[in-house]
Image (cartoon, rainbow, N blue to C red):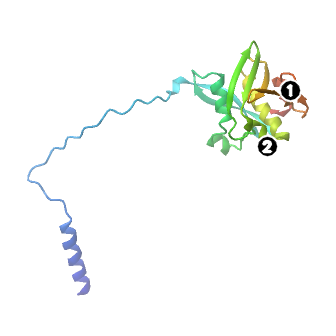
Amino acid sequence: MRRACSISLLCIVLAGCGVPIESEPEILVLEFDDPPPVNEPLVEDLAAVSMYLVREERLVHVTRDLPTSSDLEDVLDSLLGGVSLPEERANLRTSIPNGTQLLGLEQEGALLRIDLSREFASVGGEEEILAVAQIVLTTTASDSIDLVTFRLDGVPTDVPVASGALSVEPVAAQDYQELFDP
């Protein structure tokens, strides 16, 4: 009996919550604003760009899709931004310290001067060699750049080559070839 009362009470409550039935269907007119334009590039507006990341203390060539309008500054900004989730899942990482920012680029013929923020100096030893190598190999992947020099907050700085020796001269991709996994 108690169960029958509970069911009856439930039916009465549910009936009270129902939607009233109209004698004729009502037409609803919904107005939407135009969606804002999307400025993301289309697939055909992307190009594969060469970059170098780290796996097991070795440099690994990867490609990233960047807008075709990207210049070397955009490429370096992408590299300095760290690894993507798919890259991380592939056990890739970066040796470039988090927070490193590109402050400027100057190209003179085949020589590129890169000015980075002080965060770049927070890494040392083998990680510093790999970080410099990532940048050098990424920038010299461009057909127009052969040599790279570095500045930190506008001040010229020496950088290590693969052997660990500091170079006062501009560095090139071949200075890091022994760190590269083809």
Q: Position of residue 161 (x, y in %)?
A: 86, 30
Q: Looking at the image, tell me whether mark 1 or mark 2 is earlier in sequence order.
A: 2
Provide residue 162's location: percent of width, then percent of height.
87, 32
Q: Secondary structure at mark 1?
A: helix
Residue 14 appearing in the image: yes
What residue is shown at x 65% (from left), y 36% (from top)? 81
Q: Which residue is mark 2?
A: 56
Residue occupying image coordinates x 88% and y 27%: 167
Instruction: From the viewer's perspective, tell me whether residue 171 is left or right of residue 29.
Output: right
Q: Amino acid at mark 1?
A: Asp
Observer-nearest residue: 47 or 155? 155
Q: Which residue is mark 1?
A: 175
Please determine whether, in this image, residue 5 is positioned above or below residue 110.
below
At 44% from the left edge and 30% from the top edge, which residue is drawn? Answer: 38
Among the 4 quarters of the image, the one containing residue 72: top right
Q: Which residue is the extreme one toward the left?
A: 23
Residue 79 vs 142, above or below: the answer is below
Front residue of 3/85: it is 85
Q: Quadrant of residue 178?
A: top right
How crowded pointer 2 is (Cα within 10 Å; few <14, some 14-19, many 20+) is rated as: few
User: Distance of mark 1 from mark 2, alpha carbons?
Assistant: 19 Å
Residue type, label 2: Glu
Q: Give residue 94's position: percent from left, percent from top.
A: 73, 39
Tell me if residue 143 can be seen. no
Q: Nearer the viewer, residue 76 or 8?
A: 76
Describe the element under mark 2 as helix, strand or loop.
loop
